[in-house]
Image (cartoon, rainbow, N blue to C red):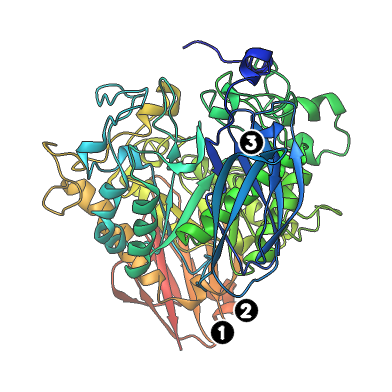
Amino acid sequence: MKKITVFLSLLIFLLATSPTLLAQKTNISRVEPLNWWANMNSDEFQILVYGNNIGLTKPVINSKKVSLLRSHQLENPNYIFLDIKIIDREVASSFKIEFKKGSKTLAQTTYNLELRKPQARGFSSKDLIYLVMPDRFSNGDPSNDTPAGILEKADRNNPNGKHGGDLKGVENHLDYIKELGATALWLNPILENNMPDYSYHGYSITDFYKTDPRSGTNKSYKKFVQTCHKQGLKVIQDMIFNHCGSAHWMVKDLPSKDWFNSNPDFRSNFRGSVIADPHASKSDQKQMTEGWFVATMPDFNQRNPLVANYLIQNSLWWIEYAGIDAIRMDTQPYPFKEFMADWGERVMFEYPNFTLLGETWLQKTAFTAYFQSGSPVSGDYDSHLQSTTDFPLYYATKSAFNEDEGWTSGLLKLYYTFAEDFLYNDANNNVIFLDNHDLDRFYTSVGEDINKYKMGVGFLLTTRGIPMVYYATEILMPGHEHKGHGHIRKDFPGGWAGDKQNAFTKSGRTKAQNEAFDFMKKIANWRKTSKPVTEGKMMHFLPENNTYVYFRYTKNESVMVVLNNHNTDSRTIKTDRFNEIMKGYSAGFEIISGKKVDISEIKIPKKSIMIIELKK
């Protein structure tokens, strides 16, 4: 694919300002945000107007509903930004914006202000998140596989190509997701990615205000969110503020020379640790935040206040327009941290009950905790994020069930990771997971061992934090990341007409897949009713003899979780060691087997997990 660089964009910009083009007629091609709301908590917002020579005009607004505070002309005359103050915040209205040259109106547009509708928002440790890559889940509308104007054609035989999954496909299988026990749905990005190739993942956005036509439309996405809410499912929207796709319309006609960072040959070092590192060099920090991911993903310069406000308002618009419950922010440490804090503060000012989840792909607990609001290790930095992705626990979980016990290996990896929870403001707000769209499939990570798989699933659904399940993990989907991302993002069997297998149904799953699905389903649906697991605290005991015991508890209830990681031997665990938490309980009920348990001495088979509701 031809590389589109900032320097090429600057050349296009210079050509666009030539005298010949300046003589062309002024017009309006885009107005963003597409609309706004009169009764937002802030009475000011900013409108981007884009069109040929629009920046060479004088904007005029004659309205009793709003006033024009100021306008911002850029180097490129095809852009103008308008700062608007809302005067009448009680009613929906519209106003006209005229763009004049002297007394002559060269262009005009009408802008609408609507009224916000109160909605419940946010997610918590009471939820179970189900992550779906729409293109690989189900093709509900084959007619939108290759719409007009889209550069990449659908090709299901290409593991890195567009396969045709869409919002309708996800909507068709909400019952399946609910049956599994999920209460929230996170979709990988659904905005337009009109790139020449490798566009299925959604992380190369080419229009921040448009749903990708291969997934649906803005209206169908809004309807999808409403349908999810009616089904009792929350919706988390994936957003990216670090970069866009190289085919984005702003790259093709650069607003200003400082709209993006540096150039595509200056790549990120991908070392998020330097953001919190007190000894980090400025050059390392610069490369982390200003370096590009790849040449096809131009890196936004959020230190430009117009860039910053454009991105922040975009997230506010989607929250209000679509009615989403939360945002998962991609690559949280990569943009300038001051900007990300401003974004978090603005969102929480407008939506105090909203949840912001930051992707903090960092190996160490302290670096991860730095990005959670209120963390004792954050110093004077406040990200305003309630939730972060718990990669330290992921790495511990990935290896724990494959290792023998050592001083820091095996189940001790889990213990030591939890022992560092004091670095977080609230570790219960961490999103925890066994795999995701960038990682080896968990079933592959544990050598396709069903017993290890069950230990991981049981652990995920009973430990502290907010569990997330990646689509098809429940049916033992395998996949190695090093073979290419297409291998960890395979199509869900049964999502396409003509599929030989339909794993959305019990009869369409193999015996092993049903065993895995039923295991996860049982614990996940029980979890909804367990206050100790969804609302309680955690107490754990040092692992001994390849076993690990932890408790989830409230004032009046307790759940005991026992892991036996030994490869060949069962274990008998005398429980007097746990008297401080088990005192007052006389019996237990094991939720997986459905059997009563003698809690004075617990016998647990090799490579297994027991989840025991304690009874008084």
Q: Earlier in the sequence, mark 2 or mark 3?
A: 3
Q: Decide: marks 2, 3 in contact (CB < 8 A)?
A: no
Q: How many labels were placed on the picture? A: 3
Circle nearer the viewer, 2 or 3? 3
Q: Residue at x 30, y 23 (%)?
A: 153
**How far separated are the C-alphas under marks 2 and 1?**
6 Å
Q: Residue at x 23, y 47 (%)?
A: 513
Q: Nearer the viewer, residue 264 or 375?
A: 264
**Is the residue 302 above or below the residue 558 in the image?**
above
Q: In the image, residue 489 lies at what x, y percent? A: 36, 34
Numbered mark located on residue 242 in the image = 3
Q: In the image, residue 299 lies at what x, y percent? A: 65, 28
Residue type beneath disc 2: Glu
Helix, strand or loop at mark 3: loop
Residue type beneath disc 1: Lys
Q: In the image, residue 301 lies at what x, y percent? A: 72, 32
- Identify the residue position indicated by label 2 in the image: 580
Left or right position of 492 against 353: left
Query: Residue 426, can we see it?
Result: no
Q: Decide: marks 1, 3 in contact (CB < 8 A)?
A: no
Numbered mark located on residue 583 in the image = 1
**How far separated are the C-alphas under marks 1 and 3?**
51 Å
Q: Residue at x 69, y 28 (%)?
A: 77
Q: Decide: marks 2, 1 in contact (CB < 8 A)?
A: yes
Q: Earlier in the sequence, mark 1 or mark 3?
A: 3
**Is the residue 614 above or below the residue 373 in the image?**
below
Helix, strand or loop at mark 2: helix
Q: Nearer the viewer, residue 382 or 515?
A: 382
Residue type beneath disc 3: Asn
